[in-house]
Image (spheres, coloured by chain):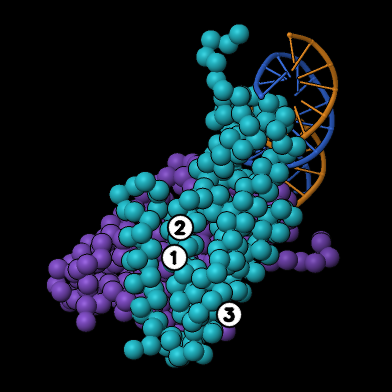
Chain colours: A purple, B cyan, C blue, D orange
DNA sequence: GTCTATAAATTGATAGAC
DNA sequence: GTCTATCAATTTATAGAC
């Protein structure tokens, strides 16, 4: 009987810790030994929950992608003027980032070194394509300036959203609503047609 | 006498290749064997030029930081209204990104795993502080909206600039001027006082 | 300036006990 | 669900020849 009786891990609670360490040290910079130390168990203990280090990455990336794609399926993302659908997707993306920060952070840092990572990159490109279609539609509907390249605007707006993972911390001084409001003000308002 | 007589590497030309591979696979995801393969020489050949893998990273990060800090020393970054100094720094940062893309990309991906990386992160924070001071001064001078948090605006604007490394490629379809113009339009114009 | 050969340490993963 | 013990492969780095 160990002196400090820690609650046993489920695969989900183990994944939470693993993703935190992956973000701190980078996926490739994290060894199974590092994970074991952070978890307070041995390396072999991890293999009871998952078959490999890469499968931990796969589970994490799946979760992040599912949360982002769910936004595109919301009614407000497919109904009404494109400019409003776009604002909805931007705001909800910030909220997903708030709710799933470690998972989305990991997704945004993937380089494509393994099949798992390449698959995630392909899904990210699909998300980008669907947002770019919204920007294009908003220009066509006359709500966004037509003197700016729509593909470039898409990249800048979602570049800004994605850059949040570098500093935003849930429960910190800045609330998710203030961040989303300011981001919409800074990015979309510069693009709107007067 | 080898059948294909490749030109010998200087430390600088070797660093160019190393930084390209670091960006493709991530620094931790790159082994000295990977570098050797990309260079077309053996692992031990690399150690003639540098004493360690980490020293390659250090040289690359130094170069990126020097290019960025040089912008802050330009006359246009310290003279005139803060709003104009800010636009100058934003535009020139995009140009530095264009000129030194692989080096800046590497800098922006550093996690702090080693002393070399921690030192680079500290220098990045110093750059952020100096830009934040410009945004604050621009609000004080009445040129930027005072209903938005200046620290948040700083982060969003430079988050947008930094996100360029994820897709911008020098010599591609989009020129550096068009990108800089659109970026200033999208970010700064949303923040200006009417 | 690059090579072959090799060392010492670390890595991801497995077998089998409790 | 976690442990000890262990392995094969890979990693960073060095010694010394050409």
Q: Earlier in the sequence, mark 2 or mark 3?
A: 2
Determine which residue is flagged by label 2: B95
Q: Is residue D15 above or below residue A51?
A: above
Residue annotated with mark 3: B133
| Residue B125 coordinates in the image, percent (x, y) | 63, 68
Residue denoted by label 1: B91
Q: At numbered mark 2, what does the secondary structure look like: helix, strand or loop? A: helix
Could you say where residue A103 lies in the image, as x and y percent from the top left? 50, 62
Q: Could you tell me if the residues under marks 2 and 1 are in contact, i.e. CB atoms within 8 Å? A: yes
Q: Is A92 or B117 nearer to us in this picture?
A: B117
Q: Disc 2: which chain?
A: B
Look at the numbered discs 2 and 3 and tell me whether their residues touch, using CB distance below 8 Å. no
Residue at horizontal 45%, vertical 60%?
B94
Q: Tag 1, which secondary structure?
A: helix
Q: CA distance from mark 2 to mark 1?
A: 6 Å
Left or right for B150, reference B15: left
Secondary structure state at the residue bearing disc 3: helix
Judging from the image, mark 3 belongs to the subunit labelled: B
Q: Are marks 2 and 1 on the same chain?
A: yes
């Amino acid at each position: 009987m160990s002196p400090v009786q820690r609650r046993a891990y489920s695969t989900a609670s183990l994944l939470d810790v693993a993703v935190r360490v992956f973000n701190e040290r980078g996926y490739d910079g994290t060894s199974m030994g590092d994970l074991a130390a952070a978890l307070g168990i041995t390396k072999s203990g991890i293999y009871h929950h998952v078959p490999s280090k890469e499968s931990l990455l796969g589970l994490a990336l799946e979760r992040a992608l599912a949360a982002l794609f769910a936004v595109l399926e919301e009614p407000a993302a497919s109904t009404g003027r494109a400019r409003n659908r776009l604002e909805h997707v931007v705001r909800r993306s910030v909220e997903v980032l708030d709710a799933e920060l470690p998972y989305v952070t990991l997704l945004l840092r993937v380089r494509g070194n393994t099949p798992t990572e390449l698959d995630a990159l392909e899904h990210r490109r699909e998300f980008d394509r669907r947002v770019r279609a919204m920007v294009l539609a908003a220009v066509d509907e006359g709500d966004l300036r037509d003197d700016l390249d729509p593909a470039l605007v898409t990249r800048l707006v979602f570049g800004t959203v994605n850059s949040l993972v570098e500093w935003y911390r849930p429960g910190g001084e800045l609330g998710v609503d203030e961040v989303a409001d300011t981001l919409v003000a800074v990015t979309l308002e510069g693009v709107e047609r007067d």
